[in-house]
Amino acid sequence: MKKDLLAINDFNQEEILDLFEKSADLKEKRQKGIQHLPLKGKTLGMIFNKHSTRTRISFEVGMFELGGHALFLSGNQLQLNRGETIRDSAQVLSRYLNGILIRTYDHKEVVALAEHATIPVINGLTDFNHPLQILSDIFTIKEKLGGIEGVKVAYVGDGNNVAYSWMMGASLMGMQLVIACPKSCQSHLAPSLGDNDKVEIIEDPFEAVKKADIIYTDVWISMGEEKDTENKKKLLLPYQINQKLVDHAKKDVMVMHCLPAHREMEITSEVLDGEHSIVFDQAENRLHVQKAILEKLLSPSQS
Ligand code: CP
Ligand code: NVA
C-alpha cells in the first residue's frame, strides 16, 4: 500500500529514527562520491502554488542523485488551478508519476490529493504545517548534539505552520518545546496542545530561551499572510532573535531558522552569521533527509 507524508505523525518514532539513519548514510555516500540509484526510472511531480528555494531545489537535486527525475509543475500552469478537480487530477497524475510533492495554501487540498492518488503524496508545506522542515531539523539537532531525547527547543516568533509542525515533532520525539509567541498569534497552535506536558506555549521570549539547547525562529509573515504585515511587525518585535536574547540561553545554544530569513526582522545578521548559528548546515540537511524520504516512499522495498 502506498504511504503519504502529510504530517510528521504519518511516521512513528521508530520510522523517524530509521529515516535519520538512512539520511546519515545518504549524506556520507554523497560526501564520498558513491553513486546510489534506487529511483532509476521513477518520476516525482512537484506542484508549487507558492514560492520555494530549498524545497524545490533539494527535491529536484535529490531525485536526480537517486537516479530518478523530477518535474517542476507550477500550479498556475496546471488545469488544476483553472477548475479541473483534485480527484481527476490525482487520478491522471497517478498514471504518469511515481510520487507527488505539493506545496500549497489549503491543507485540505493535499489531504484530498492523497486520498484520490494511488501514488505517495508528500506535503511540501501548507498553511497548516511543514513536516519536511521539522523532520530535517530534528535530524540536524541529532547530528549536532548526538541525541534528541530531552533536548530543549525554544521556538520564538509567529505561531505558524512551522511552529505547529514543531509541536507535533517534539511530542513524537520526546523533546521539550517551549513556544514564545504573542497571545494573538497563538490561535493556529491551540488545537493540538492537548495535555502534552512536553510542549508549552508562553508569551515571554526570555523565559522560553532559559536553558534552551536550540533557539528556533521562522519568518513573521508567512506566504499568503502579507495583509497582516504591519500589525505582525509591531507585535513580534519583542520576539526578534538578537544577541541579547541568545545571551539568555545556554552558553553553547544553537540558533536555527528554516529560511528564508528576513534579516533585522525576526533575526539579526549578528546572530544569523554568528558563532551560534547552524542555519546553513540545517538547510543542507533538507537534501539528505528528503532523499531518505523519497527512497522510503517511492522505493519502499529497497529502503
Ligand atoms: N524552508 C523552506 O521550506 O524553504 P523554501 O521556502 O525556500 O522551500
Ligand atoms: N512559515 C513560512 C515558512 C517558509 C518556509 C511560510 O509559510 O511562508
Image (cartoon, rainbow, N blue to C red):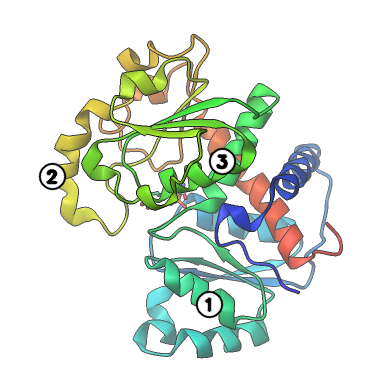
Three-letter code for the amino acid on which mark 3 is drawn: Ser
Which quadrant would the N terminus be assigned to in this image?
bottom right
Secondary structure under tag 3 reads: helix
Closer to us: 142 or 207: 207
Return the x and y of residue 165 as percentages of the image width and height: 49, 48
How many residues crowd mark 1 within 10 Å: few (<14), some (14–19), many (20+)? many
Height in image: 38 above or below 206? below
Three-letter code for the amino acid on which mark 2 is drawn: Glu
Which residue is depicted at the point 59% across and 88% down? Answer: 91
Residue that numbered label 1 is attached to: 113
Height in image: 171 above or below 59? above
Residue that numbered label 3 is attached to: 171
Three-letter code for the amino acid on which mark 1 is drawn: Leu
Which residue is depicted at the point 30% across and 33% down? Answer: 266
Closer to us: 26 or 253: 253
How many residues crowd mark 3 within 10 Å: few (<14), some (14–19), many (20+)? some
Return the x and y of residue 11 as percentages of the image width and height: 67, 54
How many residues crowd mark 2 within 10 Å: few (<14), some (14–19), many (20+)? few
Left or right: 235 as drawn, with respect to 12: left
- The mark closer to the camera, 3 or 2, is 3
Residue that numbered label 2 is attached to: 230
Badge 3 residue CB within 8 Å of ligand 2: no
Closer to us: 274 or 254: 254
- The mark closer to the camera, 3 or 1, is 3
